[in-house]
Amino acid sequence: MNIGNQIREQLDACRPGKGDLALPELAAAAQTLQRDPVAAKEFARSQQFDRQVAAALHDLALPAGLADRLLAAVESTAADRQIDRVITPVQQTASKRLIRFTRRHWLVAGGSVALAVVAAAAIYPLLLPKRRITASDLAADVEAWLRRLPESGWRAADGPTTRLDLAVTRAPVRLQRVTPSGWSSSVTAMDLVGAGRPRAILFVVHSSATISVPTAPTSSVRLSLSGGLTATAWQRADSDKLYVLVVEGPNQRLDDFLGNRSAA
């Protein structure tokens, strides 16, 4: 598939189930899906992956009582500021009435502050220079990911579970999330062969870091792993997805799982 970066960005920005492709500004992207079955298949994978990510985020549990503690802190701060302004008994009485009267206003303000903090936390990393990850750093993290793959953590991968690079010729049999490293936002491990066989794992990593890997998969450029494992990694140009293919030998090769190396 050969589509422009602008069309690719528009497709990646579409939200599952929101009908974004009906927007006039996305007409070109919608036409691309109609005439290009490969693009349509890849788009379906991307949408399914986004739905799974959203479901995983909904499963995250907040600490018990967090909301109450935040609201209590906001109310306490607001009350302290009002009382500090008291000079006379008359003003003190007025201030107490003001505190009671404006409680909801302080709660609303506190919610706005909380939203501002969340927004700042999301924007701040974008202002920092991109982190550079060397091949040796990546190899160390891959070995750590492999150690964090409990057998009980796998779940079946039914249908197009994620947007795989088209160079990968095997569909995942099962998958599980992995605790990401500090430079990545998410890591998904995909088992390409299933239980009871020598491992063949594809890691799909989302990261804004600059990673020292080729822009297309190649069995001649490998990561240095121990334990009889062979691995290669690649990241397409202008993409935030890093792919790491790990196979366990001696009867499996990287080429057994890689087809069209130039596919985007």
Image: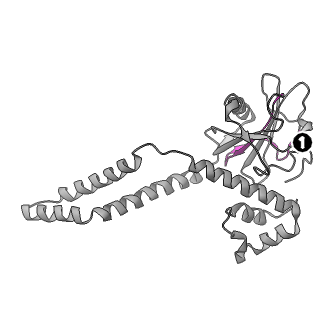
- Asked if the magenta segment contains residue 210, the reply would be yes
Count neighbours of disc 1 (C-alpha within 10 A) and say few if under 14, some if 14 to 19, many if 20 or more.
Answer: some
Measuring from the top left, give residue 185's x and y in whole percent. Answer: 63, 45
**What residue is shown with label 1?**
258
Residue shown at 66% from the left, 30% from the top: 148
Q: Quadrant of residue 110?
A: bottom left
Measuring from the top left, give residue 246's x and y in whole percent. Answer: 80, 33
Measuring from the top left, give residue 19's x and y in whole percent. Answer: 69, 69
Residue shown at 68% from the left, 64% from the top: 17
- Amino acid carrying mark 1 in the image: Leu
Which residue is nearer to you in this view: 251 or 243? Answer: 251
Which residue is nearer to you in this view: 240 or 203? Answer: 203
- Asked if the magenta segment contains residue 19, the reply would be no
- Which image quarter is the C terminus in? bottom right
Q: Is residue 206 above or below residue 219?
A: below
Residue extending farthest top: 227
- Which image quarter is the N terminus in? bottom right
247 relative position to 185: left or right: right
Residue extending farthest left: 89
113 relative position to 34: left or right: left
Chain part drawn in magenta: 198-218
Residue shown at 35% from the left, 53% from the top: 71
Q: Secondary structure at mark 1?
A: loop
Residue extending farthest bottom: 24
Measuring from the top left, give residue 92's x and y in whole percent. Answer: 12, 61
Residue shown at 61% from the left, 39% from the top: 182
In the rendered picture of this protein, how many numbered marks are placed on residues? 1
Residue 149, visible in the rendered structure: no
